[in-house]
Image (cartoon, grey):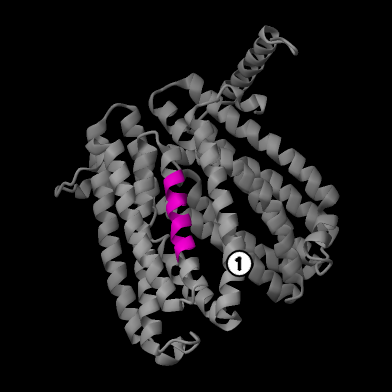
């Protein structure tokens, strides 16, 4: 175990990191399994149709409008302060809100599915129009029900069981996908695969609630009374949460479109391949950062300045430890990695590789710090700013790409991340999320403890 994490052995942070690693492994395994099974047993035409209609649950799963994330932060703060009544009020308010959202979405999806023209469903090979409508409707229902999962995850986080919630979430996700892939393997069609997802999703919700009830019965008991004032209070931080994925989708997808428009379609694969390579480092930093968030919320709510500083130090130091080697790897070996990865099909300008590596470095530092602000439900300080900056970045990328090619898009993203670094760092200082002195003191304390530990247990000692 790295020395940086040694003092967190057997802590909730370590369990949270292990849960995040498990999540990444599950996602990777499912991607590796799904492509050959679906393509082989359905054929490319049917598989392509499945990918199209499966965008429906993917989009609907994010339709909680930020309420669950905002409520999760709020409940964690309340529980850390010993105010269970406030946590219960928040949980019931967000659960009722999500139920209302799900009900409305189900009605809208059902209406949409049955009024869309038949010709739009003709792309689903091997199914009648009626079967295709039913498949889309079941996937829509699966996506809507998935909204409830974010509420359960918020509840697990609030009671200090982030790792348990994440392990449960990803295990259910694994079971859902394995069940559907098994149905396809034994000859099932799109409608049967959709039904499998829906049935497994319903069972997953029941399992989550049973386990949550066993861990925190005081929180999840059924109650009819819901505070409208509480819902209104959560609305502002919820909308601020919603701005974050919109901003990310804007610059991630918008920049690709701009590269295609300004430099032509052949420039897009090189840009996306280099961006994917550079984002590996950022994703690794999030594995640590997301595990730290609930603990940082608890330490801040309990006014435990020492632990809060240690967690902030862990966040920043782990990002640096991960990103610096990744920066060296991408800048020095990037062309070789691309050549081996794509079998020589993609060649990227070195300027693009260098600019995206720098973007990775800056993004991988400010994003974890912004998440510490998010952990305190104060993310409105930067989320709307991020949305506007992402829009400006996409607009700026067009003339830059026209001028210097795809490297211009990378420079536009680098400018976005530099602006956000300045905004987030100043915001963290202004909101007293942590101070530079606290982090430096935590670093010195950790260094002293490691030296003391080394003195007590010299190499070769029994």
Q: Secondary structure at mark 1?
A: helix
Q: Residue at x 25, y 60 (%)?
A: 100
Q: Residue at x 54, y 81 (%)?
A: 46
The quadrant holding residue 340 is bottom right
Residue extending furthest toward the bottom: 119
Side of 145 where 88 appears, left or right: left
Position of 205 relative to 287 (above/below): below
Side of 250 where 112 appears, left or right: left
Position of 447 relative to 292 (above/below): above
* Quarter occupied by the C terminus: top right
Position of 248 relative to 136 (above/below): above
399 or 244, nearer to the observer: 244
Asked whether the viewer can see residue 418, the reply is no
The magenta segment: 167-179
The quadrant holding residue 132 is bottom left
Residue at image mark 1 = 254
Q: Residue at x 74, y 39 (%)?
A: 324
Magenta-colored stretch includes residue 425: no
The location of residue 291, given as percent across then percent down, is 51, 37
- Magenta stretch: dominant secondary structure: helix
Magenta-colored stretch includes residue 173: yes
């Amino acid at each position: 175990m790295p020395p940086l994490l040694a003092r967190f052995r057997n802590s909730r942070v370590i369990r949270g990191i292990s849960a995040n690693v498990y999540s990444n492994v599950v996602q990777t395994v499912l991607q590796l399994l799904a492509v050959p099974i679906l393509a082989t047993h359905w054929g490319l035409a049917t598989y392509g149709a499945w990918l199209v209609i499966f965008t429906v649950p993917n989009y609907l799963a994010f339709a909680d409008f930020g309420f669950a994330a905002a409520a999760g932060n709020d409940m964690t703060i309340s529980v850390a302060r010993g105010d269970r009544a406030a946590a219960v009020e928040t949980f019931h308010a967000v659960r009722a809100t999500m139920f209302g959202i799900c009900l409305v979405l189900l009605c809208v999806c059902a209406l949409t599915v049955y009024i869309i023209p038949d010709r739009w469903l003709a792309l689903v090979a091997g199914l009648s129009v009626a079967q295709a409508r039913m498949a889309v409707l079941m996937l829509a229902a699966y996506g809507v029900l998935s909204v409830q999962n974010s509420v359960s995850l918020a509840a697990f986080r609030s009671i200090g069981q982030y790792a348990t919630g994440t392990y449960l979430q990803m295990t259910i996700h694994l079971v859902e996908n394995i069940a559907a892939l098994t149905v396809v393997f034994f000859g099932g069609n799109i409608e049967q695969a959709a039904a499998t997802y829906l049935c497994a999703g319903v069972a997953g919700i029941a399992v989550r609630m049973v386990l949550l009830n066993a861990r925190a019965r005081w929180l999840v008991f059924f109650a009819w009374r819901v505070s409208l004032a509480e819902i209104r209070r959560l609305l502002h931080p919820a909308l601020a949460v919603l701005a974050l994925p919109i901003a990310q989708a804007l610059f991630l997808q918008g920049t690709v479109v701009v590269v295609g428009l300004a430099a032509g379609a052949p420039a897009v694969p090189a840009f996306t391949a280099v961006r994917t390579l550079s984002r590996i480092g950022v994703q690794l930093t999030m594995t640590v950062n997301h595990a730290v968030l609930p603990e940082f919320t608890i330490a801040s709510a309990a006014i435990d300045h020492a632990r809060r500083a240690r967690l902030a130090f862990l966040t920043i130091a782990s990002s640096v430890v991960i990103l610096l080697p990744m920066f060296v790897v991408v800048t020095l070996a990037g062309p070789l990695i691309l050549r081996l990865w794509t079998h020589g099909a993609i060649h990227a300008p070195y300027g693009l590789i260098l600019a995206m590596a720098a973007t990775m470095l800056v993004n991988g530092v400010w994003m974890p710090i912004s998440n510490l602000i998010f952990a305190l439900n104060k993310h409105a300080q930067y989320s709307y700013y991020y949305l506007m900056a992402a829009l400006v970045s996409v607009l700026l990328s067009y003339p830059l790409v026209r001028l210097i090619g795809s490297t211009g898009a990378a420079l536009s993203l680098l400018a976005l991340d530099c602006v956000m670094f300045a905004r987030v760092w100043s915001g963290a200082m202004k909101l007293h999320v942590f101070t530079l002195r606290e982090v430096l003191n935590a670093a010195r304390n950790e260094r002293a403890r490691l030296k003391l530990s080394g003195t007590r247990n010299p190499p070769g000692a029994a």
